[in-house]
Amino acid sequence: DVYKRQVVVFAVFVDCLCSAVLRPNYPAMIGMFGNHPDQFPKETMKGIKHNLAMYLLPGCTAVGTFIAGTILAPLSDKVGRKPCMNLCLFVGAVCSILKYLARKDFMLFSGACFLNGLFGASSTVAIAYIGDVFAGDKSAKDAQMGMVMAMAMLGDAGGGIIAILFKGGLFDPLFITA
């Protein structure tokens, strides 16, 4: 039982890490700092200015995550926590690949961010799971929910830190290309 809780917490961490790893690179991707090899071509920006684009990319993910939280947590009551958590993680991995494939088109990349958000409810499902496991022990439930939220925040920040650490090194381009 302890192992399952640790796996759930780690899954939340990984899911949040994956969704955040490109966020510090959004300014370079939209062309705020001049020419960058991984910048979206101007014609795919459809006249969207830098400031709006900086809100749209994380906003697409956030709107998708909001929708996911309202749908997947109640769905996990019916079909189970594990299938919903696995769905979030599997589709999150697929969306990471989709983002890579959409890296040359702003609108497609924004759509991939939204789709990634639509399955970004691992923390919501994890909190529902913790509520089930610790139904009778409020202090243990609060501690475990705090751990889930801490891992979500650490994963969110960790994704950005990883992106910044790799900048200028082996992975200077944002995307590894052949």
Image: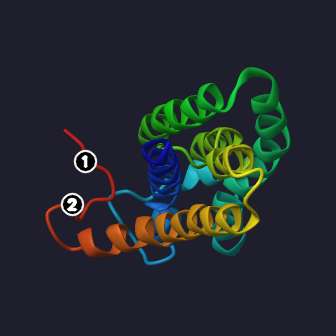
Can residue 127 be seen here? The reply is yes
Could you classify mark 2 by the number of other residues whose Cα lies within 10 Å: few (under 14), some (14-19), or many (20 or more)?
Answer: few
Q: Secondary structure at mark 2?
A: loop
Residue at the image position 65 percent from the left and 30 percent from the top: 84
- Where does the image place residue 178, in percent across and percent down from the top left? 19, 38
Q: Amino acid at mark 2?
A: Phe
Task: Say if 143 sits above or below 68 in the image.
Answer: below
Q: Is residue 42 left or right of residue 47?
A: left
Query: Which of the pair 110/17 is nearer the observer?
Result: 17
For this orientation, the residue located farthest to the top is 79
Residue 171 is tagged as: 2
For this orientation, the residue located farthest to the left is 170
**What residue sits right under mark 1 in the picture?**
176
Residue at the image position 42 percent from the left and 69 percent from the top: 158
Task: Say if 93 sits above or below 162 in the image.
Answer: above
- Where does the image place residue 12, in percent across and percent down from the top left? 53, 52
Can you tell which quarter of the image residue 168 is in? bottom left
